[in-house]
Amino acid sequence: MLYGLRTFYCPSGSGQTGRMADQYAQSGEAVRPADVAAMPAIPAIRWDEPPEGPVLVLLDQTRLPAEETELVCTDPPALVQAIRTLAVRGAPLLGIAGAYGVALAAARGFDVDEAADALAGARPTAVNLAYGARRAQAAYRQAVAGGADERQAAEAVLAAARALHKEDAVASARMAVHGLTLLDELMPGGGHRILTHCNTGALVSGGEGTAFAVALAAHREGRLRRLWVDETRPLLQGARLTAYEAARTGMPYTLLTDNAAGSLFAAGEVDAVLIGADRIAADGSVANKVGSYPLAVLARYHHVPFIVVAPVTTVDPDTPDGAAIEVEQRAGHEVTEVTVPFVPVTGAEVGGGISVAPLGTQAYNPAFDVTPPELVTAVVTEEGVVSPVTTEGLAELCARSRQVTIS
Ligand code: MRU
């Protein structure tokens, strides 16, 4: 398939970039795993400094796979809009975007606290978004408290965003190693047939992703027989994005409708489920893309491991349990209409898509669901694997991570 680059201007943005840049190019020392070098990088996000001033450049995920289109954000409101419309999405990448958004605010003379609040609250479930925005805000405040002028404080916050970007790439590579080791332990002999949901690859990460990175590692080692890709209604992150990434990386993959998963399990075609997470509560409850919980139930019934892959930054010790996780409710038109990437919208209907339900139909559209810890076989992080998934196990992992970060 041939992909062309176009540049799209955010409503409140300006500035232009004309090339697909390497997402690692702006982030200091190389953190890309050696064997990725041969594969074309997907620049999900990058900081750029054209003559008109600093900008945040996003690969517009709403237009994939039809087009690789860059979205240039020159101010925090444009980025908030990009986050809400899912032009940029997925927990780890939202954290990185949040941090760069605060850097953009500082560099462009916006009120940094106001920007951090707006970015942190743009979507409620993925804890990484608030984590990234607040971490960058803290770097700014620390610089100011230390006597930095505006330019120096802006540099400090940009350095914090780049550090988070780089850390996420490292975490991704480490999760892939831990995850593949776990798969090989659970299913010696390889030939893994993995079912995944939503999109968890390089499009959501500073590196190669979370769950997808594990499947990709298995593929590179010759141990992936098939990646089963749930289409992930209503916004089709599986069909549009995971299939796009699987095709680019040469993985053997098959797309299925979400409701075909049951018969796939019944046919004995699934060896493991691998998903990411938007927030993991202290008790191990996992919020992830709606449709994850039914897969966990199916996996338990069919005695198939259900594995969650996420960086430690997705574990939220301040959210005690699943009931305390705020699940984002999205607009009903995402369910009552279908939209096709890059088909021009008329604007005549609510969401600009093609209606598939009678006019006025009410829709139930939670973006996420919550899987209780007892249905999760293991949580794989960059710090190691927790199995069984317990409050104590997760707390120990987080403590280990904090030690690493502080030292
Ligand atoms: O609504 P989205 O597309 O942002 O949802 C993304 C997911 O649910 C992913 O599975 C999750 O963020 C994990 S990605 C590492």
Image (cartoon, grey):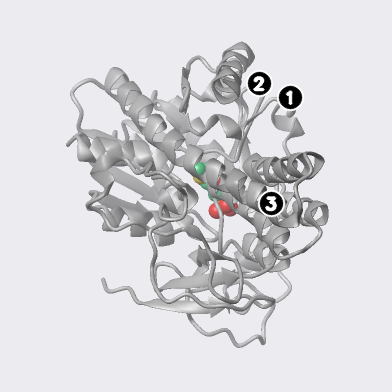
Marks 2 and 1, how far apart at CA? 6 Å
Q: Find disc 3 in the rendering and name its residue.
A: 152
The image position of residue 334, as x and y in percent, is 62, 65
Q: Nearer the viewer, residue 290 or 397?
A: 397
- The image shows a total of numbered marks equal to 3
Element under disc 3: helix
Marks 3 and 2, how far apart at CA? 41 Å
Q: Quadrant of residue 305?
A: top left
Mark 1 burial class by Cα count in 10 Å: few <14, some 14-19, many 20+: some
User: Cβ of disc 2 within 8 Å of ligand 1?
Assistant: no
Find out whether the residues at labels 3 and 2 contact each other: C-beta distance under 8 Å.
no
Q: Nearer the viewer, residue 127 or 105?
A: 105
What residue is at 45 percent from the left and 26 percent from the top? 301
Mark 3 burial class by Cα count in 10 Å: few <14, some 14-19, many 20+: some
User: Does 317 sit above or below residue 366?
Assistant: above
Mark 2 burial class by Cα count in 10 Å: few <14, some 14-19, many 20+: many
Mark linked to residue 268: none
Element under disc 1: loop
Q: Quadrant of the C terminus?
A: top right
Element under disc 2: loop
Q: Earlier in the sequence, mark 3 or mark 1?
A: 3
What residue is at 66 percent from the left and 60 percent from the top? 104
- Specify whether 187 is left or right of 159: left
Q: Find disc 1 in the rendering and name its residue.
A: 320
Mark linked to residue 283: 2
- Specify whether 386 is left or right of 316: left
User: Cβ of disc 3 within 8 Å of ligand 1?
Assistant: no
User: Does 260 sit above or below residue 80?
Assistant: above
The amino acid beneath tag 1 is Pro
The image position of residue 169, as x and y in percent, is 44, 41
Marks 3 and 1, how far apart at CA? 38 Å
